[in-house]
Image: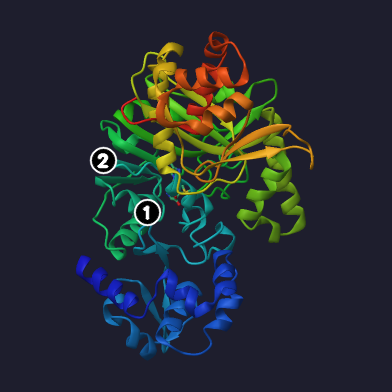
Amino acid sequence: MPDRADRLRDALLAVDFTADGLLELLGAPAYAALARSETVPALRATRADGPLATLVRLFLLQRPVPRERARTVLPLDEALADGWVVEDGDAVRATVDVRPYGGPEGQDWFIVSDLGCAVGGAAGASGHGEGVVLGVGGASTTLAGITVRTPVASALDLGTGSGIQALHAAQHATRVTATDLNPRALEFARLTLALSGAPEADLRTGSLYEPVASETYDLIVSNPPFVISPLASGTGEPGTRLTYRDGGMGGDDLCRSLVQQAGERLNEGGFAQFLANWQHVEGEDWQERLRSWVPRGCDAWIVQREVQDVTQYAELWLRDAGDHRDDPERYAARYAAWLDEFEARRTRAIGFGWITLRKSGAQEPSVVVEEWPHPVEQPLGEAVRAHFARQDYLRTRDDAALLGDHFVLAPEVMQEQVGLPGAEDPEHVVLRQNRGMRRATKVDAVGAGFAGVCDGTLSAGRILDAIAQLMGEDPVMLRDRTPQAIRLLVEEGFLEPAQGA
Ligand SMILES: C[S@@+](CC[C@H](N)C(=O)[O-])C[C@H]1O[C@@H](n2cnc3c(N)ncnc32)[C@H](O)[C@@H]1O
């Protein structure tokens, strides 16, 4: 089978069935429409026959293709024998969606998923009920982008689905284990890896950490079934649960368990990275609630990217399942069930975000829980790694040590002056990162001046002395009050300790 997957892969690549090839054939609007699950523009763009158009119609648009035409593009007998396609009169049909996916270094990969659900939710699914396996969605690429890509010995992709996270992990982990509650998903992950030319992963069926109960990893990633729904807790209509999103535990318990139990499954220095949803419960501080999930011995960085009220949230997932196309009364009843669930749980809103843990064994772990809803620049894996490295550095520095250290301004930090047009002095100065988290922070004249001269030459204390002299301030007072601001600039990545600090 590996050889046969290679032959199929070669056939796909031979006609440029790649992300770039698709863009060229379909044109940007139809290509973008396809990524929104809209197939009409792509159908029109593939009316003229050609080998690439044939594959697009077969694997992406769910159209039967004349058998003899398919034979000119694919090793057809093998594809039939291995079940990629089936006969349909004089034509063949695909049994799975095979979607070109460009890897971070320009690799030509393929993601295999159920027909009709390569993008978006189950709304376009053709059967398979609760076990439907989705392709690449926004959540998948978000997690792939934030994952720390340091070379490691072992990685675990929990809830692998189509296998996209395992495929990424296979590039920098010697051993990849991929698990899923849904045995169909593991079959899809196997096909994704084989067709993308990646090494085989250790595939295991089971819930949460059950299949890996006695093992530990250098990297754990999971885009779990994080949806907080009446279906997840089993209180919704029977038979409507979708395994890819409804975790089968009440509220946000699945995400909480995943995070809480990660500490025991991580090697020292290892990272665990999750996408998650969490409840904003009446009378509880959401940040405190999340802090309580962090396992002992782990540092954590939790970023809330979005908050939706319960109505927006219910609508999002009702649409995801295609319920809005159902009979209006049934739709209304389902909508009400979501609101009942939230009322019972005193949930007023739901947060979406990223949770990263790093096993440090620190006596006083660094736990940062923040809201950052602004645009960021993916991939952020390096920014995530650097966040924890800065926390390690800051942990070892009291104010005196900080003043003795040298710093450099991080690359692509710009200064903006904000104030009324024509005013002599700016009202305030903002430092802005033009990459990574794209943070912005207000600084005073001392902060701006300090950041401006940080090129690693002088120690922080020396710079402050010079600023004090320039501004006619008492240098002792300035040395006294500024370390906190420097600490913040380092913590948020505006300043970096110079090499050797
Ligand atoms: C949102 S999908 C993510 C798929 C893929 N990893 C990605 O990033 O696109 C969640 C996956 O978790 C699986 N899953 C659901 N409940 C699970 C559980 N209790 N334990 C492990 N996996 C589970 C689903 O079958 C599904 O494949």
Q: Which residue is mark 1?
A: 163
Q: Position of residue 356 (x, y in %)?
A: 44, 33
**Disc 1, SS:** loop
> Residue visible at 33% across and 88% down?
72
Q: Amino acid at mark 1?
A: Gly
Does residue 227 show up? yes
Q: Is mark 1 within 8 Å of ligand 1?
A: yes
**Residue in front for this viewpoint, 261 or 492:** 492
Q: Position of residue 381 (x, y in %)?
A: 41, 43
Q: Amino acid at mark 2?
A: Val
Q: Residues within 10 Å of mark 2 (few under 14, many from 20)?
A: some
Horizontally, is 457 left or right of 470 in the view?
left
Query: Does residue 221 lie above or below 344 as drawn?
Result: below
Image quarter for residue 45?
A: bottom right
Q: Residues within 10 Å of mark 1 (few under 14, many from 20)?
A: many
Name the front one of labels 2 and 1.
2
> Residue visible at 59% across and 42% down?
231
**Residue in front for this viewpoint, 390 or 256:** 390
Q: Which residue is mark 2?
A: 152
Q: Do the numbered discs 2 and 1 sit on residues whose CB atoms are within 8 Å?
A: no
Quarter of the image that includes the N terminus: bottom left
Q: Earlier in the sequence, mark 2 or mark 1?
A: 2
- For the residues labelled 2 and 1, the Cα–Cα distance comes to 18 Å
**Residue in front for this viewpoint, 154 or 67:** 154
Does residue 81 show up? no
**Disc 2, SS:** strand
Image quarter for residue 252?
A: top right
